[in-house]
Amino acid sequence: MTIIPIAAAFTLTGCFASPAPAPAPASDSVTETGAAEPTSSASPTSAAGGSAASGDVAEPGTKAGVGEELVYEFTGTDDQKALIAAKLVDVTPATPEQVDFLNQQFDKDELKGFEISFIHVEMSKVSGDPVEFNADYTSFKPADAEGQRVQDVTVIGWDECSTESFTPEFDSGEPITQCFIAAAPAGGAKPAGVYYDGGYSDVNPYDYYDGKPLLFVQD
């Protein structure tokens, strides 16, 4: 394995030889990203029941607990439009063996002293255009209970915690589960879920800095 540091705090790039899930994501990297500045202090709005069934798009800043779905509009690479429902499944501490594996992917003890958690998010398509082989898992980031970002570690090609593109079955209504890795300093803010920041749309009311992300966190 080769680790190539780049000029950014808490950021690394590299790869390892685990088989990638199909369909393959667009990138082949291992990245640790530093925590960003907190968003607006405005209190999130609680999730309204039945939003996924009705197809109502969640208002910016809406907060959902475990198992509560929020719907947002996804725009694909060819301007496809679809409504996607997402919900937090759980936040689970990594096992010692999983922590050892992750530590082996870095050669400078970057994860030393961090507590590692896996965050699982289930996604399903509500309606709209075909979106197979598109993806928006990069729009989700680990967060604490207040919605502030927690440092994340992205590993491509690790079956024990992976993200994937939208499959043809996803277009037919079959859900997929994405796994996100959070790294919190011992004694620091604990990951409680994820926020959704709307990706890179030109007009984005969910933006972490200039808008209000959707928040999926456990109590």
Image (spheres, rainbow, N blue to C red):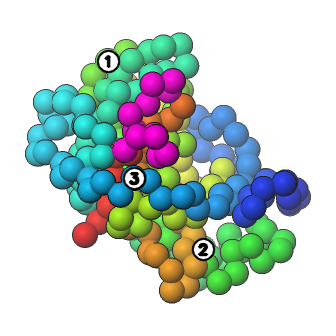
Between 85 and 48, the residue placed more toward the observer is: 48
Mark closer to the observer (2, 1): 1
Highlighted magenta segment, given as a residue range: 201-212
Q: What residue type is disc 3 on?
A: Ser
Residue under the image location 44 percent in, 75 percent down: 190
- Nearer-N-terminus badge (3/1): 3
Which quadrant would the N terminus be assigned to in this image? Answer: bottom right
Q: Whole-percent x and y of residue 146?
A: 35, 64
Question: Label 3 crowding class (10 Å Cα cut-off): few <14, some 14-19, many 20+?
Answer: some
The correct choice, above or below, for 91 with respect to 96 in the image is above
Q: Mark 3 points at which residue?
A: 40
Q: Mark 2 points at which residue?
A: 98
Q: What residue type is disc 2 on?
A: Gln
Q: Mark 1 points at which residue?
A: 128
Which circle marks residue 45 in the picture?
Answer: none
Calculate the distance from the C-alpha at mark 2 to the C-alpha at mark 1.
38 Å
Determine the secondary structure under disc 2: helix
